[in-house]
Amino acid sequence: MLDPSPPSRTGYPPPDVKVRDFRRGDEAGIRAVMEAAFETDAMPGWTPAEIDVELSRIPVDPGETLIAEVDGSIVGYWARRFVDLRIHPGHRRRGYGRALFTAAVERTAERGEEAITLHVPTHLAASVGFARAVGLAYRSSLWQFRLAAGTPVADPVIPDDLVLRSWTADIDVDAFVAFANAAWEGHPSPLGLTAELARLVAALPAFDPGGICFVSRAAAPDRPIAFAKVEVRATEAGPPSGWIGQIGVLPEARGEGLGRMLLRWSVAYLRRRGAADIELAVEAENELALGLYLRAGFERVVAWQHWVKPLPTSLARPGSGAELGDRRAAR
């Protein structure tokens, strides 16, 4: 999020900017913004590989991703899923960030959410100034953890009353989404997975069905109670890295050691696939998960701050669900 408060000489809103929903074909323009920002902003923990990952997972659901366009060229974007608002370095301080944020607030309220969340890179003074100017305040931190190659981790022990299975081509995606979101119930940042996004990821050329592990009781093998999703990602040089994207357990199955078992399964699977360092992200306030990862040998390497602005329900359109208090924070 990299556009400070616009200079007064430009006026607001800027007359030359158009904010619209993302559509397929915008990826090249977003990539140009990301790559330019990568060169100038030195974002901690951000690598060229992360650009590819984010671009491949932008859903087309209305209101999920917004584009700022000037004279037909993309100058910035807001991605709800990645709590990310970014302006091309050559187009900053012109009010485009504020225009995007204003539209993002409206779309977030339409979804019935109580607040909008953005990642604020605090090593950039302009980003902090922008965040404060639009009414955001610090809420929490997301920590990137890394398990160094060669750090010993015990193999998973699978009890006899449990069975494991992988993703299959005939899986009921809608049922999976409902299960995955339920498995993240009560998490500091709920998963908020959609069927459209699940299908998008499953259709990627690099999608690995074996990297998703479902845990079920042997007495009900078709009813998962926990799951993990991992990926092997290429690096600029050297062996690939591993990424543990999600570990989730249904509320009624928590306290049985399934999270620890799935963490060990994840590390073992990634190392069999050739991964060296293994990374994951966890909310700093998730004390149970923090303890699990620290005991396994993971170390914190980056802290990303999330800032929040509460939204008045008066912004929501009739029927949006705001009056029901529907709360689905972006991860």
Image: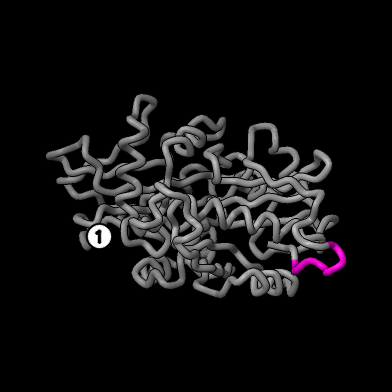
Corner quadrant of residue 52: top right
Residues rendered magenta in the picture? 4-10
Establish if 206 lies above or below 307. above
Crowding at label 1, few (<14), some or many (≥20) Cα neighbours within 10 Å?
Answer: few
300 part of magenta stretch: no
Q: Which residue is mark 1?
A: 257
Residue 91 picture location, percent across and down: 83, 55
Residue at 63% across, 58% down? 102
> Considering depth in this image, is 181 or 64 the residue closer to the camera?
64
User: Is 141 on the left or on the right of 247, as rendered?
Assistant: right
Q: Indicate whether 225 appears above or below 102.
A: above
Residue 10, image x and y in percent?
A: 85, 62
Residue found at x 16% / y 46%: 160
Classify mark 1: helix, strand or loop: loop
Amino acid found under the numbered disc labelled 1: Gly
Residue 283, image x, y percentages: 46, 66
Residue 81 locus on image (x, y percent): 53, 51
Viewer-proximal residue, 330 or 152?
330
Task: Let me know if residue 5 is in the magenta part.
Answer: yes
- What's the residue at 37%, 48% (across, down)? 228
